Structure formats: structure tokens, C-alpha cells
Image (cartoon, rainbow, N blue to C red):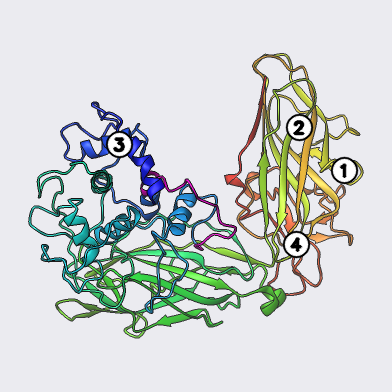
């Protein structure tokens, strides 16, 4: 740590900023000098809003602290992420991993103190946990046998030594009423003070304020019961709902899939929620009136806070009946304060369930109709009243969870930007890759591209002679390329062209295109550009408007799995019947047709496995999140 802090000493010699670096940090605010010191020292970047009163998340704190101590200097990115919920693409990934390597954080643990490999980067911190992390990060020697000064910090509390060490080093001072507030959320303003003071303490400068100033009393009611069994970080009893749940295809065997999140709070008093029932119900908004049996879900895990704000995790097998009851919980919902319950699921592997797994729709959530005292039970903290789900004394808000679809394997897409400006001649309109999960291979019947041509110069910009490549191999005789809007063949063999406006180009494989398990293949869509002039542009997207249903009801007239489905589903041109208006109506569009190759009788439409869909449309492939490709002249 000595080499790291030498860097900090140089940073601290920089002059303090005099003008506020953020639009919401006034010069008169108590936290202004601390914020400005972090800006001057290169710990945070100026500009925009600082959001001083917002709770600091665990991930953002790692970024601030690791930057403050120069903790990236000897950092080596791990081969395998340390935490299941922190991915390499996450903004704070390297800061969190660096903190773990330096022994600053270890993540959450279960009730027995065993790591559960969850960091909770979007979870807010309470003041006790933030103080412990700060003391460890700056290498401050933890004092022993310190005298208590805060009425809510007892010698038996796991955070006592950390809080008193920080207090004795004049890093923190507490509230004006004398409390420390260990379970209160630590705000971004308070973090600025803590980090600035910790740096000043190490370098031997006086950067503190008069005791009692600068920290307004937080009225959040807290329970100060001690945790004498562990030095684990505590999760406060209210965390903001920062996680967005989107429906996706789930590959069989996925573990820890986030399914739903609920927000509870007591209206008149706090409540001990003892019993909850989780159901699989894929129909309507009321969960519990049409419970759906499923073989897809192996087990369900609940995460929630107890009365002391300690994170609890409980897991149990999920029966095929589609309903699981969780009893003897210690979930606490405070009065007028939010407490969140999260639901996760482990998906059965395809090898366990077989063909019937693929295509199963699942939606896990709390049973919110037809509850009784056996399926939902909550006890008032003071009144000892027993209430049921939906009582006026206990409020719940979670909305309706999303529906997921389970598959044997799931393809993923990535876009690569082509080089160079828009110019006449043959050009790459889009380069992209498709990867198959290691769970199994996938195949495609067709791909669709939305192409927007902007002839801003008025020089009759147009595109023709479309070609499709697998890597460097031209798929000339293996695909058909046509414009679904104009109804014309736009391949080199056809005479069709695309002009100003929006067109939908479909690439149909004469035989299904297969990507093997664990394989990634690059593809190119190219076209010949004519009459390109200054101001013109062409934007290409993968088709994203697939109908939110599985592809069923089509009957193939021949055996091969081909994607030759034409404008208006003309069965004389293609190989399908019952494909009316199949190509160019957004309301019923199936832009991408793919298969997880799960059915024993592998073909378009329903398989002989009953509920298992083999070929399906592109619904839930999440192509909306892909970048578009724009070429400008």
C-alpha cells in the first residue's frame, strides 16, 4: 500500500478548486470543499450533477476508493469474474475486481458466513459498511478497546472497531443529535467527506470540520440490534429498485436467473413477513389464478433483508405443479420505508427434461390472488396483528413480472462497424457475428435487415446486387435475397433496386444455416451503391420487430428446412401454407427464423414433442439493443 499512497501525496499537493465543479453543489454546501478536493485530486470527474443526497451504490464506491488509493496500479484482470453478478462489461467491473484483489471487499455471505459470490454492485451501502470498507482501503490500523461515543454503536456490534477507528482519526463525526446511524444509507455527499478526510489523515493534514456539522439527521427509522456472530457487511433494509428485468430466451441449465423484484413497506407499522408463495403463472396480470405446471424450473431463491438489515438468502426446489411456499422467513418490511424482495431461478438442463423443456414459457412471481394464511402471512411489529397479502396495512408494489422462454440453446449477436465513408461501388452494409451457446448448436432459416436510404443530394442514390458472405465465402447459390417491401429480387441475379426510404431486405437460406455449439461465425451483408453524392447516408439494422409469439401454424410442403418465405407468404413461391402476410406487416412480422435444434423431428412449426417449438421467430433475441450501422458521405 505504500507505493499506492505515494501517488496520493502528489495529488494532494494540487491547489483546491474555487468554483463549484457540479451544477448541484453550491459553494455554501457543507460538503462542497470535500467534493472539490476529490475533483482536484483526480478522484472524481467534474461536470453535470453530483447528486449529493443520493445513496452511494457499492459499485460506485469501489470506483471512488480504488481511484483515490491508486488501486489499479498493480491490478491484473482475473480470468474468471470473482462475483456472479458483476460482468466484465459492467462499468465498475475492474474497480470491483481490484478491490477484491486488495482484500478490501469480499462480497455477501450466507447466514453461516460462507461467500455466495454476490457483490450487489447496484445495492446502496449503509454507513457502517461504508466505514469498514474505507478503513480497510486506506490501510488504517483498527484500534482496540476504544471508548464508545455514539449511543447506537455498541461494543458488541461488528462495525464498532471500524467506526471508532474512523472517529478517532477525525474521518467522521456523526449526526448533530449524537447518533452515528449505522443502518442509514450513506449519501454521495457523506462519501466525499469520508474519502477526503481519510486522504487528509494519511497525509497528516487537517481537513476536518467542527463536530456535528455537515451531516443532517436522517429520519430513516433503524433497528440497531447487533450482529455479534459475524463481521459481514450488512445490507440495509431498503434498497432502490435499480435492476431492469427484460424478457429473454433462457438456455437450459442457467443458474441465478433474475425473475422478479417486489417493493414492500408497512403503512402503519413494520411487519415480519413469515410466509410467501411463488407461482408460475404465464396468463394475465393476476398471479395465482392460473398456476401453470412446468418442468423448466429446478429451484427458486429469495433474497430479502431481515430486521437488522442483514441480507438473507433462502433456496428451495420448485415443484412441477408450478407453486412453491416459503415459510419461516425473517423478511422485515419497515414502516413507510421500502424493503425489496428479489426472486431468482435455476433452470433445469435440457439433458434432464428433454424435448419438452424447449419452448416452455415461465413467469415467476408472488401469488397475489387466492391467498390465505397458509400462503401469505405477515405479523405487525407492535400490534402483533396477522394480515394477508394486499392488506391496507402492508403495501406491495412489484408490477407483473416478465415472461421468459426456455430453450436448449440461445444465439447471441454482435455488430462490427465497417470502415470508411459511403462511396459508390460494392460496400459492406453490415458485419455481424452470431454465436451459439455451449449448450448446443442453433440454425437459421432467414435473416432480415431494415435498410434506410437517405438520398439527401437528390442524385438518385440506389442500392442493388446484394451479396451475403459467411466469413470470406460468398453464399451465392445458398441464399435468396429479396426486398420484402418492394417485392423484388435484389441479388446479383435479379434486377431489383432499393432507393430512397425504408426497405426490408430478407436473406433466405436454401438450407438451414447452422452454428455449432460454442462456435462464432462472422457474416457480411454487402451491396453495390450507385449515384452516391455528398450528404447521402445508408443505415442498416438487423430486423427487430418480431411478433411476441412463437412461430407456429405453418406447414412445410417439402422436407428441407429452408427460409424461402416470400412477400405475403405466397405458397407458390415459397414452401409454406398458412403464411399469409408473413413478411411485410410489422404486426405479424417474423424477421428472423431460428431453431435451437431441440426437437427429435426437426422442422418448421410444431414438433412431435407436443409443447416443444423447434424453429421459432426472433422474439426475445434482444436485437433492439444492437447498434445500427450508418455510412455517410
Q: Is residue 76 magenta?
A: yes
Residue at which label 3 appears = 12
Q: Which residues are magenta?
A: 65-84
The quarter in which the C terminus is drawn is top right
Residue at which label 1 appears = 475
Residue at which label 2 appears = 428
Q: Is residue 26 magenta?
A: no
Q: Nearer the viewer, mark 1 or mark 3?
A: 3
Q: Residue furthest left?
A: 177
Relative vertical location of residue 417 with respect to residue 159 in this rendering, above or below = above
Residue 451, image quadrant: top right
CA gap, disc 2 to disc 1? 15 Å
- Please tell me which of labels 2 and 1 falls first in the chain: 2
Q: Nearer the viewer, mark 4 or mark 1?
A: 4
Q: Nearer the viewer, residue 25 or 5?
A: 5
Expressed as whole percent of the image width and height from the top left, the position of residue 197 reads: 23, 46
Amino acid at each position: 500500500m505504500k507505493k499506492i499512497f505515494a501517488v496520493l501525496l502528489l495529488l494532494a499537493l494540487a491547489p483546491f478548486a474555487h468554483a463549484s465543479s457540479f451544477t448541484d453543489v453550491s459553494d455554501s454546501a457543507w460538503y462542497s470543499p470535500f467534493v472539490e478536493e476529490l475533483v482536484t485530486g483526480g478522484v472524481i470527474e467534474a461536470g453535470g450533477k453530483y447528486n449529493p443526497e443520493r445513496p452511494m451504490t457499492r459499485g460506485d464506491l469501489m470506483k471512488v476508493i480504488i481511484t483515490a488509493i491508486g488501486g489499479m496500479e498493480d491490478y491484473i484482470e482475473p480470468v474468471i469474474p470473482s462475483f456472479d453478478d458483476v460482468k466484465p462489461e459492467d462499468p465498475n467491473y475492474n474497480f470491483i475486481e481490484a478491490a477484491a484483489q486488495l482484500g478490501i471487499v469480499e462480497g455477501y455471505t450466507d447466514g453461516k458466513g460462507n461467500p455466495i459470490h454476490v457483490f450487489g454492485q447496484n445495492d446502496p451501502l449503509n454507513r457502517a459498511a461504508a466505514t469498514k470498507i474505507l478503513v480497510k482501503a486506506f490501510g488504517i490500523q483498527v484500534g482496540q478497546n476504544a471508548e464508545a461515543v455514539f449511543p447506537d454503536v455498541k461494543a458488541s456490534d461488528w462495525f464498532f472497531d471500524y467506526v471508532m477507528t474512523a472517529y478517532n482519526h477525525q474521518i467522521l463525526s456523526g449526526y448533530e443529535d449524537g447518533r452515528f446511524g449505522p443502518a442509514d444509507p450513506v449519501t454521495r455527499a457523506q462519501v466525499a467527506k469520508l474519502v477526503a478526510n481519510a486522504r487528509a489523515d494519511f497525509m497528516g493534514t487537517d481537513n476536518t470540520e467542527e463536530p456535528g456539522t455537515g451531516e443532517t439527521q436522517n429520519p430513516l427509522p433503524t433497528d440497531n440490534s447487533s450482529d455479534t456472530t459475524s463481521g459481514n457487511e450488512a445490507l440495509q433494509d431498503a434498497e432502490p429498485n435499480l435492476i431492469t428485468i427484460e424478457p429473454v430466451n433462457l438456455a437450459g441449465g442457467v443458474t441465478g436467473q433474475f425473475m422478479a423484484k417486489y417493493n414492500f413497506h408497512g403503512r402503519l407499522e413494520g411487519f415480519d413477513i413469515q410466509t410467501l408463495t411463488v407461482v408460475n403463472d404465464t396468463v394475465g396480470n393476476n398471479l395465482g389464478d392460473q398456476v401453470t405446471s412446468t418442468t423448466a424450473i429446478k429451484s427458486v431463491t429469495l433474497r430479502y433483508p431481515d430486521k437488522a438489515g442483514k441480507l438473507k438468502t433462502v433456496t428451495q426446489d420448485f415443484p412441477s405443479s408450478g407453486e412453491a411456499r416459503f415459510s419461516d422467513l425473517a423478511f422485515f418490511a419497515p414502516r413507510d420505508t421500502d424493503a425489496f424482495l428479489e426472486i431468482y431461478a435455476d433452470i433445469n438442463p435440457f439433458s434432464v427434461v428433454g424435448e419438452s423443456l424447449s419452448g416452455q414459457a415461465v413467469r415467476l412471481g408472488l401469488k397475489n390472488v387466492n391467498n390465505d394464511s397458509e400462503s401469505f402471512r405477515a405479523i405487525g411489529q407492535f400490534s402483533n396483528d396477522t394480515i394477508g397479502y394486499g392488506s391496507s396495512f402492508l403495501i406491495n408494489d412489484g408490477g407483473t413480472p416478465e415472461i421468459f422462454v426456455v430453450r436448449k440453446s440461445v444465439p447471441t449477436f454482435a455488430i462490427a462497424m465497417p470502415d470508411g465513408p459511403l462511396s459508390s461501388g460494392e460496400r459492406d452494409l453490415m458485419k455481424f457475428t452470431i454465436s451459439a451457446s455451449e449448450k448446443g448448436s442453433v440454425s437459421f432459416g432467414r435473416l432480415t435487415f431494415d435498410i434506410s436510404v437517405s438520398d439527401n443530394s437528390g442524385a438518385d442514390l440506389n442500392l442493388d446486387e446484394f451479396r451475403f458472405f459467411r466469413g470470406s465465402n460468398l453464399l451465392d447459390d445458398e441464399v435468396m435475397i429479396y426486398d420484402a417491401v418492394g417485392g423484388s429480387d435484389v441479388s446479383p441475379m435479379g434486377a431489383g433496386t432499393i432507393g430512397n426510404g425504408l426497405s426490408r431486405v430478407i436473406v433466405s437460406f436454401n438450407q438451414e444455416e447452422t452454428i455449432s455449439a460454442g462456435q462464432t461465425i462472422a457474416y457480411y451483408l454487402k451491396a453495390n451503391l450507385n449515384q452516391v453524392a455528398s450528404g447521402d447516408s445508408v443505415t442498416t439494422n438487423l430486423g427487430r420487430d418480431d411478433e411476441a409469439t412463437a412461430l407456429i401454424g405453418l406447414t412445410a410442403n417439402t422436407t428441407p428446412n429452408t427460409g424461402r418465405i416470400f412477400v405475403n407468404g405466397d405458397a407458390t413461391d415459397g414452401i409454406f401454407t398458412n403464411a399469409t402476410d408473413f413478411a411485410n406487416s410489422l404486426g405479424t412480422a417474423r424477421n428472423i427464423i431460428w431453431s435451437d435444434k431441440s426437437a427429435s423431428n426437426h422442422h418448421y412449426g410444431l414438433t412431435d414433442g407436443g409443447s416443444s417449438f423447434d424453429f421459432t421467430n426472433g422474439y426475445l433475441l434482444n436485437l433492439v439493443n444492437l447498434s445500427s450501422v450508418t455510412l455517410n458521405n
